[in-house]
Image (cartoon, helix red, strand yellow):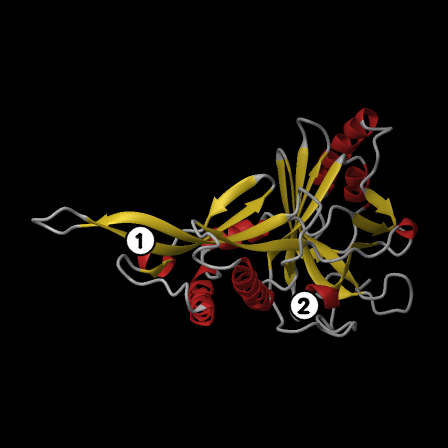
Amino acid sequence: MKPTSNRLALIRGFIFAAGYIFLFASSLFYPAEDLLAEDRPVIQVNFEFVGVNENDLSKEDRAAIKLKAENLVCEVAEKSWGFLDWSNESQGNASTAKWNISFKVEFSELANEPHDPIPVTKVTLRHTGLVAGLENEFHQIEENYTIYKPGYLIPFDDPVTLGGDITKKLDEQLSVLFKKEEVKSYIKDIPIVERIIAEKGIKRYLIPLQRSDLRTKENSILKVQFKISDHESGLLYLDMHRTVSEEGQYTGYVKSRVKDLDIHPMNIETDPPLYWDDDLSTMIDSATEIKVYMEEYKAGLASVPVVDGIATEPDAGGEPR
């Protein structure tokens, strides 16, 4: 259902005020003819040894174990969060999100009464995430993050066994970590794109990413944050329901419908979702910043063909675009 006339009047009043303030602002709701598809956002995976030197493990062995561990994390993560490009290649962009794994040798003392404590080492395998300059530690119980308990011999003299122990532990950890809410929240904070395409002639909203790259077979929900001024912002939730099927420069792009609109002090829920609204499009035109996030992701295990295959019938009250 579209917003009522009173609500639309409120929106129009808001638009006119914003329009005067931002008449010359650069629009982030770009004309369709100027845009190309973007790549999946990258999340860089890094594995590091902490407290390990070349006397313990050679540089070559460390590099081989590091590569194997990073590849494993990328492979497992792609199955759960395939709309991100999990890569262990170094990224030049300082804003790139990161997933860091540290193999850390920690020194402690083992009680040995009535004698003096015995100095021992234990080794932990911890995970942190970095996004927007903020580091998140993904908490685990001690049993999960400890790979070698105090007093256990670390097989530095057998790199194959060491590497196998690390990948086995990573498998165990990731099966738990990827289900934790703190990890899901971290993933949701990574913007997948920072613009929207408004095809005003056809009246549809497009996200400049290929559905096949996003690797989802079912509807997912996108969250759009847009800033109109230092004091005004808006929030949209978009139903990623179809792809562009016709041949052309936007073949395979994600087509979206508006599910919820939240602009202080208004909160408008639309049921069924809106395919297009002139007032909303004008308001987004005045935005100075747009960021699109994956709010609810329903993953497919592989890329999907570029076809109009998700919602074969339009919802009641709307037309497919």
Label 2: which residue?
215
Give the residue displayed 76% in from the left and 34% down from the top: 288
The local crowd at label 2, few if under 14, some if 14 to 19, many if 20 or more residues have their Cα within 10 Å, is many
The local crowd at label 1, few if under 14, some if 14 to 19, many if 20 or more residues have their Cα within 10 Å, is some
The reply to whether residue 273 is in sight is yes
Please indicate whether residue 131 sits to the left or right of residue 246 in the image: left
Image location (x, y in percent) of residue 217: 66, 71
The reply to whether residue 141 is in sight is no
Label 1: which residue?
121
Which quadrant would residue 60 be assigned to in this image? bottom right
Give the residue displayed 29% in from the left and 62% down from the top: 152
Image location (x, y in percent) of residue 201: 91, 53
From the viewer's side, name the closer residue of 55 and 300. Answer: 55
Please indicate whether residue 106 sits to the left or right of residue 192 in the image: left
Give the residue displayed 61% in from the left and 67% down from the top: 299
Q: Residue furthest top?
A: 21
Three-letter amino acid code at the position of disc 1: Thr
- Which secondary structure, mark 1? strand
Please indicate whether residue 182 sits to the left or right of residue 218 in the image: left
Please give the count of numbered marks on the rendered protein.
2
